[in-house]
Amino acid sequence: MPVATLTSATLPNTTLAAAYEAATPGSGALARKARELLPSGIVHDSRHFDPYPIYVTRAQGPHKWDVDGNRYVDYYGGHGAMLLGHNPPKVMAAVHAQLDRGTHFGACHELEVKWAELVCRMVPSGERVRFTSSGTEATLMALRLARAFTGREKLVRVRGHFHGWHDHMAMGYSNHFDGTPTNGVIDGVAQGVLLVDPNDVDGLTRLFEQHKDIAAAILEPTGASFGRMPLKREFIAALR
């Protein structure tokens, strides 16, 4: 199928949005159908696009193709998971080999032991590993463990940092930078979360001086939004 190139030279006298819609009618049709079936028409918040997201049909190496045959260079990389590109031969061979052996055993497997060994080797400070099905589960369990271990209740979070969708992590994310609870988060939960501005060492110090019942602190060490808003070393050092 032809590869569309959206440039002013090939598509003169038109707006970018009009050029986008002209090149992606298949995605537009799917988006309209999706809005009838899915809240906001998407299954992940990162796919909020105006006028609509593209719908991908296949990928290979550094490229993705949409349902209209347009090819894109993939800088998103599956939320960072596709560091080796799409369909690398060695990875695909390993996946196919495992598919032939089975997919869901509901039992212990030697690969979980090998996986844990690899994680501990790569992260020496991680003495043991607990696998979860999502990041939301991981932060939920980590917070509960911290509270059980310390006997304290409060959680320190950095405004704008994302750690999943359960109530303690949703409060203070997105546009609620004034500290008001996210809709649907009860006051009792919100009161257990202490927010600090990124890189505000003085504010961080005050929190720990004023609250003696802090069980844990959580942050994105590289900064919010995939490191696009980096944290300073002195802030992380102060938190330690």
Image (tube, helix red, strand yellow):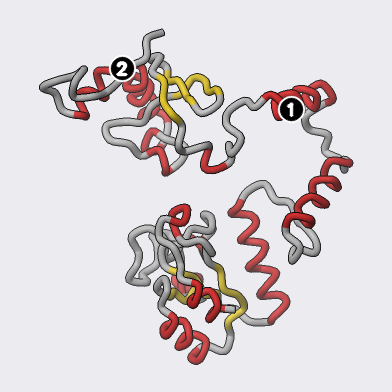
What amino acid does circle 1 point to? Val
Instruction: Identify which residue, 165 or 80, lies in the foreground.
Output: 80
Q: Is residue 158 above or below residue 17?
A: below
Q: Earlier in the sequence, mark 1 or mark 2?
A: 2
Q: Is residue 39 above or below residue 9?
A: below
Residue positioned 45% across, 20% down in the render: 65
- Could you tell whether 124 is left or right of 208 in the image? right
Disc 2 element = helix
What residue sits right under mark 1 in the picture? 95
* Residue extending furthest toward the left: 13
Residue carrying label 2: 25
Q: Which mark is residue 29?
A: none
Q: Label 1: how many residues lie within 10 Å, few (<14), some (14-19) or many (20+)?
A: few
Q: Residue at x 47, y 24 (%)?
A: 64
Q: Position of residue 62 (x, y in %)?
A: 51, 28
Q: Residue at x 24, y 18 (%)?
A: 22
Image coords of residue 21 (percent x, y): 25, 22
The image quadrant that residue 105 belongs to is top right
At label 2, counting other C-alpha atoms closer than 10 Å, the crowd grade (few under 14, some 14-19, many 20 or more) is some
The answer to whether 136 is drawn above or below residue 91 in the figure is: below
Position of the C terminus, as image quadrant, is bottom right
